[in-house]
Image (spheres, rainbow, N blue to C red):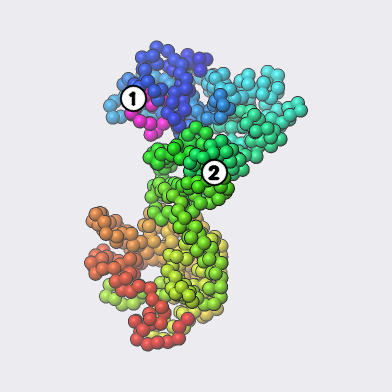
């Protein structure tokens, strides 16, 4: 830090997760700006009363890249350059920190305005220095001298331009950069680096022993993502392996986030519990709802950055010796003493992650499942399962949700197991039927109907769809139910051929699982050909969520289905991750507006304005419009005036068996399915 301060007004080492200044070096300017409080908070330098919500150091740690920002200091503009590093404390624990290089700008900040960003060229380095590699060397030298880790810096051409003393000492190589570069070329796992791995564990033989090295790889970019170079940080973690030097941290650390993996979490959690016999514990599981959408919508790198942000959040939420880890995919766990848990603190920290993601298409949803240990000898896997049961009980769609495990959840789990085990027999024995809900014009004329599944159990009677459909979705069996209902619907259309009912269309639902599991064009063509039904009689409803999960696949699917003669509806439009761009690319025949817009709220007028624009937009795109959930004459008249074509809801009829549907609308009983 001292080596680089001549180029900057002051330099600070900060822990952005805890907003703490760990060390600071600088000249007279720094002394003039003492923190407003004596608690060492890093944001006090900038006169903030809370965390800076656009903190460059926080963004640098999460992204693993150099970040820049302009701040106000005593009415003057300062440029802050944040370089992420890993810092090892006295206990051997690794912490994500940042070096902040701060330079005062000549311009002043106008109250309420932030100065325009300077051009990237030269903005991060001394004006006298035009050689970027030399500037990068100076910064890395400052970082390397302070860090207890081995630091090796590369230029954009992959040449080694700097290494600190710890690097040569760690790998027992003489003080020659070319020799160190040669060793790294042969030892580093290039596949891990090239696939985007930012952190991983490697080992190498040294004398008679085997050393475990925590490797971090950082791309260093200036503003505008202009590459400056890269650097590696190597930390010897052999002593953290609890005596197992042959595998050690290779076995228990997640390479993406650096947290314990499942095996590591289980081992450390069991040890933590044994050290606190008789004390109350919580097992908290953190889940990212619909995380697969992040990768599909924004790419793998954004998904990895999101996982790292959640991992960093778990580290910050842990207190003292609390154990935390990434136990599987997008699921994390924290074992904490009950006295350490503060829901308000958890909410505040989690909201920072949600707001950091900030995307209008998809909102990050974090779910927390809490299990209170009955006794410390319980199996760790059972604790995690029960915390996950709590998460599965969450029904709301809030960006943050908390649920605590109760004994009733075991009953629900047994019920779900019974549903799954008896479902195939129910299909085989004809216990699953289609019910039809009409889709009407404003004057009540029948236009079409939607086929919905109902399970009529010989002992339990009618099982409501919300009691078995979500279970089948979680069990990955929903495509079996859908395939069965599709055939029932097509068979019903065949039975109506040649009667006064043959002009009534039936619509069926397609789930995201169906799109992933089946070649839907082939399946539907096979069904209509099998029963001699015109494809135009069968409408296919694809939910908005399914489209957003894989837009390109749905665009191609819709085109193929329409070419085969089927009409395609976008179902539940406006219910969750809606995007108007979706309608630009997906040329569906009908837009089905979700019932959420008809719910009674204090914002009915605003909802009506939104409905007006959606309906007009759909009509301009030559799409039909159906609104579901219509329950009152007032809603019907309002929607009719706005230009809606068709209506579905309890005002006309609830879903009813096929024979009741025929009696109600045709006054004649015919052969049904």
| Residue 373 position within the rendered picture, expressed as x and y whole percent measured from the top left | 50, 46
Taking 196 as reference, is 512 above or below it? below
Taking 538 as reference, is 469 above or below it? above
Residue of label 1: 47
Taking 397 as reference, is 21 above or below it? above
Neighbours of disc 2 within 10 Å: few (<14), some (14-19), many (20+): some
Identify which residue is drawn at 41% across, 22% down.
Answer: 40
501 sits left or right of 637 in the view: right
Find out whether the residues at labels 2 and 1 contact each other: C-beta distance under 8 Å. no
Q: Nearer the viewer, residue 503 or 308?
A: 308
264 sits left or right of 98 in the view: right
Say which element carries label 2.
Answer: loop
Q: Nearer the viewer, residue 76 or 253?
A: 253
Residue bounds of the magenta highlight: 42-57
Identify which residue is drawn at 36% across, 24% down.
Answer: 44
Identify which residue is drawn at 59% across, 35% down.
Answer: 199
636 sits left or right of 460 in the view: left
Residue 182 visible in image: yes
Residue 193 visible in image: no
Say which element carries label 1.
Answer: loop
Identify which residue is drawn at 70% across, 19% down.
Answer: 174
| Residue 340 position within the rendered picture, expressed as x and y whole percent measured from the top left | 45, 37
Residue of label 2: 376
Neighbours of disc 1 within 10 Å: few (<14), some (14-19), many (20+): some
Q: Earlier in the sequence, mark 2 or mark 1?
A: 1
Q: Hey, which residue is sitting farthest top in the picture? A: 28
Please identify, in this view, whether the residue under mark 2 or under mark 1 is nearer the observer: 2
Give the spatial CA distance, label 2 vs label 1. 46 Å
Q: Nearer the viewer, residue 296 or 52?
A: 52
Q: Hey, which residue is sitting farthest right in the picture? A: 208
Taking 632 as reference, is 545 above or below it? above
| Residue 580 position within the rendered picture, expressed as x and y whole percent measured from the top left | 38, 54
């Amino acid at each position: 830090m001292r080596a680089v301060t001549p180029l900057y007004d002051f330099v600070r080492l900060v822990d952005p997760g805890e907003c703490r200044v760990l060390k600071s070096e600088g000249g007279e300017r720094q002394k003039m700006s003492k923190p407003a409080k004596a608690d060492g908070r890093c944001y006090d330098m900038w006169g903030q009363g809370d965390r800076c919500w656009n903190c460059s150091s926080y963004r640098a740690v999460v992204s693993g890249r150099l970040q820049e920002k302009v701040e106000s200091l005593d009415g003057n503009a300062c440029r802050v350059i944040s370089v992420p590093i890993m810092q090892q404390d006295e206990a051997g624990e690794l912490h994500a920190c940042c070096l902040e290089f701060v330079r005062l700008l000549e311009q002043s900040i106008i109250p309420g305005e932030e100065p325009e960003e300077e051009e990237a060229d030269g903005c991060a380095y001394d004006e006298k220095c035009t050689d970027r590699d030399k500037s990068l060397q100076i910064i890395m030298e400052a970082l390397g001298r302070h860090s207890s880790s081995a630091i090796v810096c590369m230029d954009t051409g992959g040449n080694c331009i700097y290494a600190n003393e710890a690097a040569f000492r760690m790998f027992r190589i003489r003080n020659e950069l070319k020799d160190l570069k040669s060793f790294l070329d042969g030892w580093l796992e290039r596949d891990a680096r090239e696939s985007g791995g930012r952190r991983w564990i490697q080992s190498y033989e040294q004398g008679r022993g085997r050393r475990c090295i925590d490797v971090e790889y950082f791309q260093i970019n200036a503003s505008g993502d202009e590459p400056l170079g890269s650097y590696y940080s190597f930390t010897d973690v052999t002593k953290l392996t609890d005596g197992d030097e042959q595998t050690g941290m290779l076995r228990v650390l997640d390479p993406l986030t650096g947290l314990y993996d499942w095996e590591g979490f289980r081992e450390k959690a069991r040890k933590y519990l044994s050290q606190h016999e008789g004390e109350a514990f919580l097992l908290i599981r953190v889940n990212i709802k619909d995380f697969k959408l992040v990768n599909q919508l924004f790419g793998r790198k954004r998904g990895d950055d999101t996982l790292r942000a959640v991992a960093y959040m778990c580290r910050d939420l842990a207190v003292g010796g609390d154990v935390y880890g990434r136990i599987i995919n997008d699921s994390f766990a924290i074992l904490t003493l009950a006295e350490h848990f503060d829901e308000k603190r958890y909410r505040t920290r989690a909201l920072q992650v949600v707001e950091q993601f900030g995307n209008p298409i998809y909102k990050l949803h974090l779910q927390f499942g809490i299990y209170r240990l009955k006794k410390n000898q319980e199996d760790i896997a059972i604790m995690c399962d029960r915390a996950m049961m709590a998460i599965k009980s969450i029904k709301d769609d809030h960006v943050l949700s908390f649920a605590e495990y109760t004994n009733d959840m075991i009953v629900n789990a047994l019920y779900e197991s019974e549903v799954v085990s008896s479902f195939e027999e129910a299909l085989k024995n004809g216990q699953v039927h289609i019910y039809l809900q009409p889709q009407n014009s404003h004057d009540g004329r029948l236009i079409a109907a939607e086929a919905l599944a109902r399970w009529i159990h010989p002992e339990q009677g009618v099982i409501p769809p919300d009691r078995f459909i979500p279970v089948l979705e979680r069990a990955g069996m929903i495509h079996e139910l859908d395939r069965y209902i599709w055939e029932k619907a097509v068979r019903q259309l065949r039975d109506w051929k040649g009667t006064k009912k043959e002009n009534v269309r039936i619509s069926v639902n397609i789930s995201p699982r169906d799109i992933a599991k089946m070649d839907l064009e082939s399946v539907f063509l096979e069904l209509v050909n099998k029963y001699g039904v015109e494809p135009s009689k069968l409408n296919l409803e694809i939910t908005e969520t399914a489209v957003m999960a894989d837009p390109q696949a749905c665009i191609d699917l819709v085109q193929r289905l329409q070419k085969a003669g089927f009409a395609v509806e976008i179902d539940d439009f406006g219910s969750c991750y809606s995007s108007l761009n979706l309608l630009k690319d997906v040329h569906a025949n009908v837009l089905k507006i979700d019932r959420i817009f008809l719910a009674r709220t204090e914002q009915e007028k605003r909802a009506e304005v939104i409905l007006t624009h959606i309906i007009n937009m759909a009509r301009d795109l030559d799409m039909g419009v159906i609104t579901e959930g219509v329950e009152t004459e007032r809603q019907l008249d309002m929607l009719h005036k706005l230009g809606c074509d068709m209506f579905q809801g309890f005002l006309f009829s609830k879903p009813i068996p096929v024979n009741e549907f025929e009696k109600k609308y045709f006054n004649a009983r015919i052969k049904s399915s």
